Image (cartoon, rainbow, N blue to C red):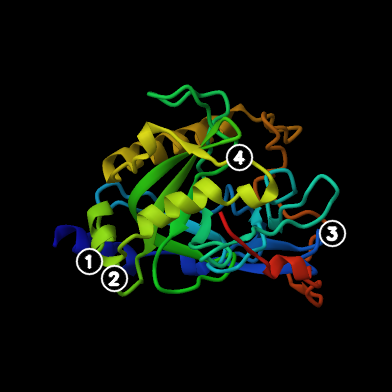
């Protein structure tokens, strides 16, 4: 009951609704960019300007949705682009990437996104493993009932985590539920997830294990004997990655805006002379027909 009261109090004072967004370019093309718009009307960074707002007692934090559930386009916060907009990941040839439909699923099986102001340090070796971070914000998998639009900032409840090993890097997947979801007050940990979302944790692990196989890559592996970590261990991971982000910010060259490890375009939310903080709508680009194909593993 105490945690329920804490969550309700956090929602009542949440500031995330004051953020908005604007879009440039054509969706499903390399030109597409969705930017964060700050409460003062200036352009901001999804990576750096949205507060993490971690509450260890209630086990809540802010999450940014990059990919709505059931969709296939691989959108993500871009670390290299000015202002870190959400963009579609592209291949080396510049072709926008889409995740394959892995039977019986369609696209991504969660609302997929990131925890702002966190960073998986590629220099730091996580205790108990031989793996270092993947140089990105922490990934989030939201399991609630709604399909959450791209760029949405939601207060979420932290439920557990899974330590994926991707290209020999540790890539944590934080399991969360939107605090506004009808089941959020009943779901507090992984046991509750099993009760109210039977087989979801198993299927999530299998999806992450196999989703790259249709692209000709091997199955992914997991640390810690493929076991999910509980809330307390997950909070340790988030706190550590938040501290890594703060050290990253402290280490940057303020005059040249240079950050180590390819994160190079955070500019303290100072609006550039040619940035108009309004959407410039263009028609969506055509999605290749091959994207609708089923793949069986």
Image position of 187 with respect to 164: above or below: below
Q: Which element is circle 2 on?
A: loop
- Pick the front one: 265 or 127: 127
**Which residue is denoted by mark 3 in the rendering?**
274
Label 2: how many Cα within 10 Å (few below 14, some 14–19, many 20+): some
Q: Decide which of tag 2 and tag 4 comes sooner along the chain.
A: 2
Q: Which mark is residue 226?
A: none
Label 1: how many Cα within 10 Å (few below 14, some 14–19, many 20+): some
**Which residue is denoted by mark 1 in the rendering?**
186
**Which residue is denoted by mark 4 in the rendering?**
218
Image position of 285 with respect to 101: above or below: below
Residue 202, image x, y percentages: 37, 53
- Pick the front one: 21 or 215: 215
The answer, for residue 11, to whether it is visible in the render is: yes
Nearest-to-viewer mark from 3 and 1: 1
For the point 69% across and 49% down, which residue is it? 215
Nearest-to-viewer mark from 4 and 3: 4
Q: Quadrant of residue 297?
A: bottom right
Q: Are marks 1 and 2 in contact (CB under 8 Å)?
A: yes
Residue 240, image x, y percentages: 42, 33
Q: CA distance from mark 1 to mark 4?
A: 37 Å
Q: Which element is circle 1 on?
A: loop
Q: Are marks 2 and 4 in contact (CB under 8 Å)?
A: no
């Amino acid at each position: 009951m105490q945690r329920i009261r804490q969550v309700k109090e956090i929602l009542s004072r949440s500031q995330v609704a004051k953020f908005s967004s604007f879009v440039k370019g054509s969706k499903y093309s390399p030109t597409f960019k969705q930017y964060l718009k700050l409460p003062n009307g200036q352009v901001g960074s999804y990576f750096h300007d949205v507060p993490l707002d971690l509450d260890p007692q209630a086990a809540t934090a802010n999450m940014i949705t990059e990919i709505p559930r059931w969709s296939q386009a691989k959108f993500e916060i871009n670390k290299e682009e000015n202002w870190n907009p959400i963009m579609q990941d592209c291949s080396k040839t510049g072709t926008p990437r889409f995740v394959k439909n892995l039977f019986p699923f369609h696209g991504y099986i969660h609302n997929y996104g990131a925890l702002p102001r966190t960073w998986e340090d590629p220099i730091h070796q996580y205790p108990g493993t031989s793996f270092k971070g993947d140089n990105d914000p922490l990934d989030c998998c939201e399991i609630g009932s709604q399909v959450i639009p791209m760029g949405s900032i939601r207060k979420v409840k932290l439920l557990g985590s899974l330590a994926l090993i991707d290209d020999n890097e540790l890539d944590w997947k934080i399991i969360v539920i939107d605090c506004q979801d009808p089941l959020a007050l009943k779901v507090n940990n992984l046991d509750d997830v099993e009760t109210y979302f039977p087989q979801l944790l198993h299927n999530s692990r299998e999806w992450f294990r196999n989703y790259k196989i249709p692209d000709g890559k091997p199955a992914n592996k997991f640390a810690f004997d493929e076991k999910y970590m509980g809330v307390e261990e997950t909070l340790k991971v988030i706190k550590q990655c938040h501290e890594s982000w703060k050290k990253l910010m402290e280490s940057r060259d303020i005059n040249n805006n240079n950050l180590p490890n390819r994160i190079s375009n955070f500019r303290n939310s100072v609006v550039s002379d040619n940035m108009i903080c309004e959407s410039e709508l263009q028609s969506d680009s055509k999605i290749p027909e091959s994207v609708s194909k089923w793949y069986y593993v």
